[in-house]
Structures are given as C-alpha cells and as structure tokens.
Amino acid sequence: MAKNTSKMPLPKLDDLFTTEEDRVNANLEKVVDIKISDIDDFPNHPFKVIENEEMYNMRDSIKENGVLVPALVRPKENGRYEMVSGHRRKFASQLANNETIPCIVRNLSDDEAIIIMVDSNLQREEILPSEKAFAYKMKLEAISHQGKRNDLTCDQVGDKLNGKKSVVLLAEEVGDSKSQIQRFIRLTELIPELLELVDEKQIALSPAVELSFLTDEQQYSVLDYIDYNAVTPSHAQTIRMKKLSQEGTLTVELIESIMSEEKSNQISKIKFNENRIRSVLPKNIEDKKIEDFVVNAIEFYNKHLQRQKSMDAR
C-alpha cells in the first residue's frame, strides 16, 4: 500500500506564541494617531476645502472635543499615507495647531478609494456644481472599470454592468437622474474661469453645458466679453454658439454679436437703496404699502411741478 507522502503544513512561528483572539484582533481596523505632515491629499481631489466660518467652527470644536470621527487613509509605498476621507477635518486640525489626527488605515485599490472618497463627500448639504462634475466623473470611471465603457459625456456612458449601464447605477446611488449626471460631467470640459462663474451662480447649468462644447479659445472669447461687458449669455445664445462651433463657423466677431443682443433676463433694472428710502418713510408703514406710498409721492410731486410750471408761465 502506497504511503501518503504529503506533509502537514508547519505552523508559523507567530501562531505558536499567540492566541486565536490575538490573531483576530491583529486583523481588525484600529484608530491610530498619524502625523498630519505624513498624510498627502487625494490626487485630483474634486471637493474644495475652504477656510470659512464653517471651517472655523470645526476648528473650535476640534480644540474643545478633538476629532470625533476618524479620517480614513490608505498606506503608500513610500511609507506615507494618502487621505481618502477627512480632508476638511485634516485642515481644521491644522488650524487648531494639532500635529496628529486620528485615522483608520485601510488598504484600498485606486477605484475603491475613489468611490469611498466621492461617497463620503456627497453627503454634505452644499456641493458646488464643479465638485459634483469632477466627483461624478471620477466615480463613474471607477465603477465603469468593471466593464467596457465609452465617452463619459454622451448618452453611451458605460456598457452594461450587472445588467445596467454604469451611469444608471450611479444615478440610483446619488439621486440625480442619468441625464443630470451627464450634464454635470460636461462641466469638466469648461475652462476653469467659466466653471468658477457656474459655481458663483453667474452662469446657470443649462447655458454652461452648451458652452462646454466650444473650444477653449472660443470659451476664452466668451469669458472676455463677460468680463468687459458684465453680461452672461442666455441659454438660447449658448445653443446658437454651440451650433456654429460644431459647424466650424464660430468666430470672435460672431460671439460678440450674439452676446451683444439684449436678453430679457438682463434688461437693466432700477435699484434703490432700501435704507435711504426707509429713512424718509413713516416709521409705522407696512412693507406691502411701501410701493404705493412711493408711487403716490412721486405722482404728487409731478403734479406739484406741473402746477409750478403753469404759474411761472402766467
């Protein structure tokens, strides 16, 4: 009868001197304090870290209570760490003069890190259009790696992934429609200066999407006109410019001609200094009666001028 020549695997040296509980605990994620100077920002992080009142409130909270929610980092080959979730906590900790920040260290692939980074930031109440644009693009690329994909900015976004296109899966996760996601991603084709105007709500999403189809040179011509004339294009105007650009006939002169047309939403409006008006109004007047009071006063003044002219003419 043949002998069984297979050998029993020898236990590792660590296994001989540690308990099962020790080995389980060794594999559990732990919160550790890491030097802030050893943590690099996530590459091309799409979410802005702004030093504003909200950030100062976070700084004060950290001074008083510490960082209540640990940041999430992943180790780098050079011994440093890369921030995945916690950029704002890291910045607030620096403002609080802290040298370390509590972190969870987790080994993550690039795609896993992108998805976690985007998801953790999309929970914020206020997100700028530019932040959504690049975040959606990054996450869509990450989940699309599971299947062949096409252009991220057209209707053919991603092939089927688990029976659904990747953009449809993203729409189900984030709450924006498929078309809305594609519109936001189009914003990544804008020059930075125009994209900033979108964030500042000077240019609405729909005209911004149309402008994204213009060449960079054409977009800078639009920007120059905006800067010099303090007007932004309407949706209808951007549609015309996009069509001409795609036909190869859009020139600087045509851009200026289109944008010089009067737009209903940019007809000059009369503005008043509210404090100046209230200073001459009766103190007990109701807000809804202010307009009538001002109009009646102007009409009375005009009648007075007419009477004065008639008397002077005698």
Image (cartoon, grey):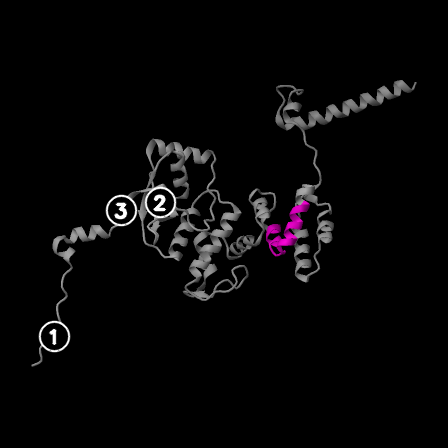
The residue beneath circle 1 is 5
- Could you tell me if the residues under marks 2 and 3 are in contact, i.e. CB atoms within 8 Å? no
Residue 285: quarter of image: top right
Q: Is the residue marked by circle 3 packed among few (<14), some (14-19), or many (20+) residues within 10 Å?
A: few
- Could you tell me if the residues under marks 1 and 2 are in contact, i.e. CB atoms within 8 Å? no
Judging from the image, what secondary structure is the residue with disc 3 in? Answer: loop
Percent across and percent down for residue 146 are 41, 64
**Magenta-drawn stretch contains 121:** no
Q: How many marks?
A: 3
User: Which span of residues is magenta-colored?
Assistant: 206-225
Could one spot residue 150 in this view of the protein?
A: yes
Mark 1 belongs to which amino acid? Thr
Q: Main secondary structure of the magenta part?
A: helix
Q: What is the CA distance from the residue labelled 1 to the residue labelled 2?
A: 51 Å
Q: Is the residue marked by circle 2 packed among few (<14), some (14-19), or many (20+) residues within 10 Å?
A: few
In this picture, residue 153 sits left or right of residue 22: right
Q: What is the CA distance from the residue labelled 3 to the residue labelled 1?
A: 43 Å
Which residue extends farthest bottom? 1
Which residue extends farthest front? 78
In front: label 3 or label 1: 1
Mark 2 belongs to which amino acid? Asp
Mark 3 belongs to which amino acid? Lys
Name which of mark 3 and mark 1 comes first in the sequence: 1
Q: Is the residue marked by circle 1 packed among few (<14), some (14-19), or many (20+) residues within 10 Å?
A: few
Percent across and percent down for residue 164 are 44, 64
